[in-house]
Image (tube, rainbow, N blue to C red):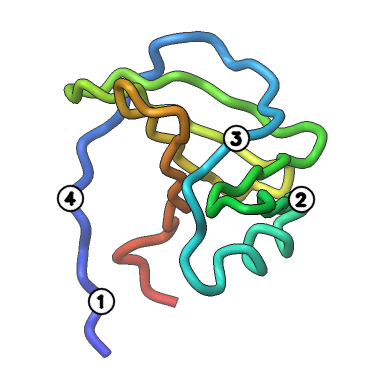
Amino acid sequence: MESVACNRVPISPLESVTEARSVLVPGLVDGAAGMLRSQGCEVISGKGSENVIINYPPGSTRQKLLASTPDARYRVKLPNGCELREVEEKGQTCMRLYMVRTGLGAKG
């Protein structure tokens, strides 16, 4: 399989690093809960709602990023090195959560 390089625009930090505790997300795709649990997160499903609370493990950090979008974006680093992105859309109570893939374009 051929490796594909990814041209990424650097994201500059906007604020200092703070402790990351938890996030409310509007549901998870299949397999996401298991992946988050394997990274040390606690996943709590809301009763009567699709919303899910993700509690990050102790030692996780959060930092607001400077991005050219109307949505607020945050870098979350878990103690084991896993990196997530939280995206807060204006007017929404829940955030979107993404796992950052590392090593794109690397062979090995």
Closest to the observer: 67 or 10?
A: 67
| x, y percent for residue 81 | 64, 47
Residue at horizontal 51 percent and vertical 73 percent from the top: 30
Mark 1 vs 2: CB contact within 8 A: no
Q: Amino acid at mark 1?
A: Ser
**In the rendered picture of this protein, how many numbered marks are placed on residues?**
4
Looking at the rendered structure, the secondary structure element under dot 1 is: loop
As measured in the structure, the alpha-carbon distance from the residue carrying label 3 to the one carrying label 1 is 34 Å
| x, y percent for residue 66 | 31, 18
Q: Amino acid at mark 4?
A: Asn
Mark toward the viewer: 4 or 2? 2
Identify the residue under disc 3: 23
Identify the residue under disc 4: 7
Disc nearer the start of the sequence (4/2) = 4
Residue 101's place in the image compared with 8, above or below, is below
Mark 4 vs 2: CB contact within 8 A: no
| x, y percent for residue 75 | 48, 32
| x, y percent for residue 62 | 58, 25
As measured in the structure, the alpha-carbon distance from the residue carrying label 3 to the one carrying label 2 is 11 Å
Quadrant containing the N terminus in the rendered view: bottom left
Q: Which mark is residue 3?
A: 1
Q: Residue furthest bottom?
A: 1
Mark toward the viewer: 3 or 4? 3
Mark 3 vs 4: CB contact within 8 A: no
Q: Which mark is residue 42?
A: 2
Disc nearer the start of the sequence (3/4) = 4
Q: Amino acid at mark 3?
A: Val
Residue at horizontal 32 percent and vertical 21 percent from the top: 91
Closest to the observer: 101 or 74?
A: 74
As measured in the structure, the alpha-carbon distance from the residue carrying label 1 to the one carrying label 2 is 34 Å
